[in-house]
Image (spheres, grey):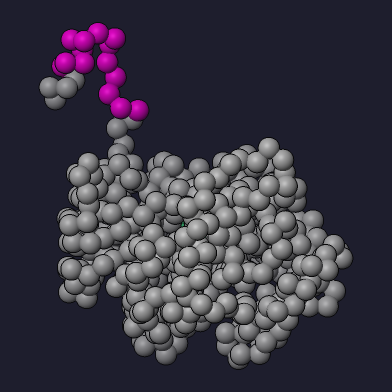
């Protein structure tokens, strides 16, 4: 790292603290020599603490005003687009960064689809199938696959790469099951940094791999699983002075909180009863949980929703810990068709455990068959998602069947990645469709089938 930190940035960040989630030791947001810190001396992961502004009504009005302002795309580079970012619009709750230093596409502004039996409006008959499948009257799906690189990772990456740029990092790296790497590669290219991504060889969906390669990242195929790649990248970054951008980087989690704020704003600042999401490395459970905790502390909402984190049955260390009342931290060798969440030793275990415990939430597991069946429902509705995202709907259906989620409760499920990320898993294998000769008779025959 070099000394490019401007006085304005240094001053803004001087109010930021990093607190260990295990032993509560705190560190300055930026340490002397600008050396980045990802872990406490005890080995625990760190959580960002910023001074939250007071005044719920004024904050709501500020965020609503920024959302309502129409965007004029800039002809000169000096014009700010931050109000139009679904992350930086909430910057008072994300990170105090001088606006001109922000690296943003912009990202966020993803759809919240009403898909429940009752709340699915006219013109959405296909979407209602999802509500029937879930067994819920009021269900929304927040589609994070609509972000610039097709997954929720962009929300954390805009903050992570902004920090990297602020610290003068020349190179950034991550281990990834594919989406973090695609996002890192894109944002690093935008900021003019070298990107190095570590992937578990043979376990990354083709669309994600193509993104990393196309955006120009050095793509390293590790002979091992994601957990091995994660251990490796941490060592590499500390020894070679490369800025680490996994969710171990506490600033990324701050950006991902914006999923929670955006859901709230789209629901007119009304908290749902449940938030349901897929769980792998547990960064997202930690981040969205933190968003709702802070929104409650700020009186933006009157209650915190219950969280349900859904794991694939073959990659379920968090579920196993939950079943034992979190008395011990479990690890597994992960196996699932949903490669995005094929993770056996999640980094953000403690942060996510706090979210589940505080919100009276739970962890559920679903089989690969249940994931693929739910994916078919989401795909056939016209919305579509990648396999890991479908764990959300599979989990909701299971929890409704078990009577844990009530039919009339307001539920928001998070879809984390775009259908096009993985064009193999769970896609009907009918070749390229139906071949016909170029005449009406041939088509008529085909349509009769
Ligand atoms: N869904 C998708 C599509 C993902 O890519 C991931 C994680 C998750 C869910 C799980 O989120 O890790 O925060 O619990 N993907 C990471 C990656 C690990 O490298 O892209 P989590």
On the image, the x and y values in percent for residue 19 come to 63, 84
Q: Is residue 156 above or below residue 326?
A: above
Residue at the spot 22% in from the left edge and 52% down from the top edge:
120
Residue at point 39% right, 51% down?
111
Q: Is residue 66 left or right of residue 186?
A: left
Q: Quadrant of the N terminus?
A: bottom right
- Which of the two residues, 89 or 430, is positioned nearer the viewer here? 89
Q: Is residue 146 magenta?
A: no
- In this picture, is 157 found above or below 205? below
Viewer-proximal residue among 417 and 122: 122
Q: Which residues are magenta?
A: 432-445
* Most foreground residue, 424 or 167: 167
Q: Is residue 51 above or below residue 101?
A: below
Measured as percent of width and height from the top left, residue 414 is found at 38, 60
Question: In which quadrant of the rendered image does the C terminus lie?
Answer: top left
Q: Is residue 214 visible?
A: yes
Total marks placed: 0
Residue 292 is situated, as x and y percent measured from the top left of the image, at 44, 74
Q: Identify the residue shown where x is 44% and y is 52%.
A: 110
Task: Provide residue 223's location: percent of width, then percent of height.
Answer: 60, 57
Instruction: Please indicate whether residue 129 sits to the left or right of residue 154 in the image.
Output: left
């Amino acid at each position: 790292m070099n000394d490019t930190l401007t006085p304005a940035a240094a001053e803004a960040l001087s109010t930021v603290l990093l607190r260990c989630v295990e032993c509560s030791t705190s560190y300055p947001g930026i340490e002397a020599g600008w050396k980045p810190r990802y872990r406490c001396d005890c080995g625990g992961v760190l959580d960002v603490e910023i001074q939250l502004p007071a005044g719920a009504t004024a904050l709501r009005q500020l965020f609503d005003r920024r959302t309502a302002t129409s965007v004029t795309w800039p002809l000169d580079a000096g014009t700010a687009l931050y109000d139009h970012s679904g992350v930086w619009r909430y910057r008072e709750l994300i990170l105090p960064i001088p606006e001109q230093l922000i690296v943003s596409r912009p990202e966020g502004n993803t759809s919240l689809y009403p898909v429940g039996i009752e709340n699915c409006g006219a013109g959405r008959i296909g979407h209602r199938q999802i509500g029937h499948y879930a067994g819920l009257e009021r269900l929304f799906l927040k589609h994070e696959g609509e972000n610039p690189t097709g997954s929720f990772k962009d929300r954390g990456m805009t903050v992570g790469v902004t920090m990297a740029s602020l610290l003068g990092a020349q190179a950034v790296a991550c281990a990834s099951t594919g989406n973090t790497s695609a996002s890192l590669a894109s944002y690093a290219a935008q900021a003019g940094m070298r990107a190095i991504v570590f992937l578990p060889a043979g376990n990354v969906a083709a669309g994600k791999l193509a993104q990393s390669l196309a955006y120009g990242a050095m793509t390293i195929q590790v002979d091992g699983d994601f957990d091995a790649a994660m251990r490796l990248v941490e060592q590499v970054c500390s020894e070679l002075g490369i800025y680490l951008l996994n969710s171990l980087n506490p600033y990324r989690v701050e950006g991902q909180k914006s999923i929670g704020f955006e859901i709230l704003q789209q629901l007119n600042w009304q908290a749902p009863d449940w938030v349901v999401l897929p769980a792998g490395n547990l960064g997202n459970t930690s981040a969205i949980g933190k968003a709702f905790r802070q929104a409650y502390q700020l009186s933006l909402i009157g209650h915190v929703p219950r969280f349900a984190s859904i794991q694939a049955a073959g990659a379920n260390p968090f579920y196993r810990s939950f079943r034992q009342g979190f008395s011990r931290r479990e690890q597994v060798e992960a196996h699932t068709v949903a490669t995005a969440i094929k993770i056996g030793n999640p980094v953000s275990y403690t942060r996510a455990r706090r979210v589940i415990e505080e919100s009276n939430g739970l962890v559920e597991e679903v089989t690969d068959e249940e994931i693929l069946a739910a994916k078919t429902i989401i795909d056939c509705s016209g919305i579509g998602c990648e396999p890991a995202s479908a764990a959300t709907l599979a989990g909701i259906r299971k929890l409704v069947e078990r009577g844990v989620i009530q039919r009339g409760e307001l539920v928001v499920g998070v879809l984390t990645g775009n259908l096009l990320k993985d064009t193999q898993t769970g896609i009907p294998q009918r070749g390229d469709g139906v071949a016909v000769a170029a005449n009406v008779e041939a088509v008529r025959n085909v349509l009769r089938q």
